[in-house]
Image: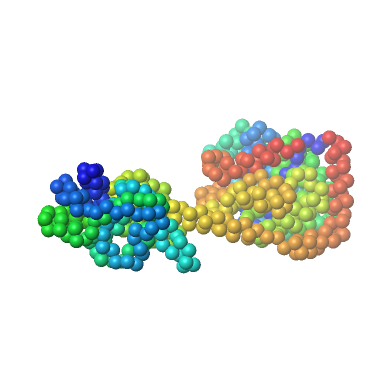
Amino acid sequence: MINDITSQLKKIAIFSGLSNDALADLAEKASARKIAKGEALIQKGEIGNSLFLIYKGWFKIVTVDSKGDELILNKCGPGEAIGEMALLDQGPRSATVIALEDADALELTRDVFKDILDQHPDVSLEIIRGYSNRLRFAITYIERAIDWSQKIAEGDYSFIDQSQPLLNTADNDDDKAAQFLSAFFTMVRKVREREDGLKKQLEKLAFEIDQTRRKKDFEEITGTEFYANLKEQAKTLRQKRTQNE
Amino acid sequence: MNKGKIISVRSFRGGTGKSNTAANLAAQGALAGKRVGVVDTDIQSPGFHVLFGLNEKKMGKTMNDFLHDKATIREIGFPIHENVGNVAGLSKLKNARIWLFPSSISGRDISQILREGIDFNKLNEGLQTTIAEFDLDYLFIDTHPGLNEETLLSIATSDVLVIILRPDNQDLQGTSVTVDIARSLDVPSLLLMVNKALPKYDPVAVKKEIETLFNAPVAGVLPLSFDMADNASSDLFSLRFPEHEWSKGLRGVAQAILALE
């Protein structure tokens, strides 16, 4: 059981650099929580004080849109951690998390976490190092995103095709960056499609013939004696040609 | 008697690339093994004969001389295939059979012609004689833009009317009247060709839209080409650059003309 929890804790980004000893210590001090279907594990706006590791069952992460309707942001299930940032900062929860079925989770409070840091001084450094890596990774993509945004503003979408390989090589360890890239590219592609569609619609609308003028011009040309004669001669000529064939 | 077809190439306004198109269409017909004649009646476009490598010095008798009984059709026809020289595009016509029938008609001469009663029948007789004397399959006429009496005459005598237009409202408006006139004069075949289409247009959509507007076939939507502008009036573009998008589109139009019954 402890081993199981240890390996799951290791998957959580901020713990990834921790030694097995430290992780076992963490696992031991975590407390089990049972959550009934429909119950909220986390309430949006509360000051976060602990991390939850889902052990069994699925949760929905929700917020409320401007009309007051529930908006599901995501779902999460066994093996996933929720609220890990709360261990480091004391910010309010950004969304509500509700159990979709009866579920089990492990709770790790900030106090427990602090004890661990005291007992394993190297852990702090590991956590900072981990965050530094993620930050560097994220900044690279933010810089690119700034560059791409400027291109989009100028109507240049050529980077989509050129940058496609980046999506496939995005580091799996940090799937938030990969998700951001993927969402960004989807957005740009859709914007381009919509723009192309509108452009063509505009060009199409531009094709117009003034039928009144068309009729007037036609009558002006065909209303002469010259034209009447010509039409008669052309008719005779065409009849002759048909006969000759 | 009516062996050869008379193909009138015209446009509502100048600048559509009409003369260039007419010359290239005729050349493509000749390359396809047809005996082709080209009559130049567009005085606004004095560079037309230059496309075929003919300069003022080489130009002898003109269609005017024939219409005034001063020359025979034989004397007027200029065999392009025998005078292609080393020009990259033109020289491909070496084994073809294509003649140019130049016209030196000035604005004043047109009114003179009309005053002197050179009428529809006379013009038609001239064209038919041209076809018969040179045993032509196709006689292309490059006409002056607009709808004056001279152009009405050439429409009336045509078997096929090819209207070149750019995809803009002014050309569409003018083309609509030309289409109506062609139908009123019972021109047997009518083909539209869109030229100088900007890349922002979807050619398939343009073709569909214009065909619906006029209830007439669009034989090609050819792109605006700066390569072409660079090469203008020195050689036949579709022969010199056969792989260019414009040339491919032009061949499609030529094939549509040759396929007509």
| Residue A224 in the figure: left or right of residue B239 | right
* Foreground residue among B79 and B198: B198
Residue at figure coordinates x 70%, y 37% from the top left: B259
Determine the image quadrant of residue A142: bottom left
Residue at figure coordinates x 43%, y 57% from the top left: A72
* Foreground residue among A197 and A234: A197
Residue A154 at x, y = what percent? 43, 61
Q: How is the image coloured?
A: rainbow
Quarter of the image where the N terminus of chain B is located: top right
Residue A24 at x, y = what percent? 17, 48
Quarter of the image where the C terminus of chain B is located: top right
Residue at figure coordinates x 78%, y 54% from the top left: B181
Please give the count of numbered marks on the rendered protein. 0
* Foreground residue among B214 and B56: B214
Whether residue A187 is situated above or below residue B160 in the rendered picture? below
Residue A209 at x, y = what percent? 70, 60
Residue at figure coordinates x 65%, y 40% from the top left: B254
| Residue B255 in the figure: left or right of residue A76 | right
* Foreground residue among B48 and B79: B48
| Residue A191 in the figure: left or right of residue B247 | left
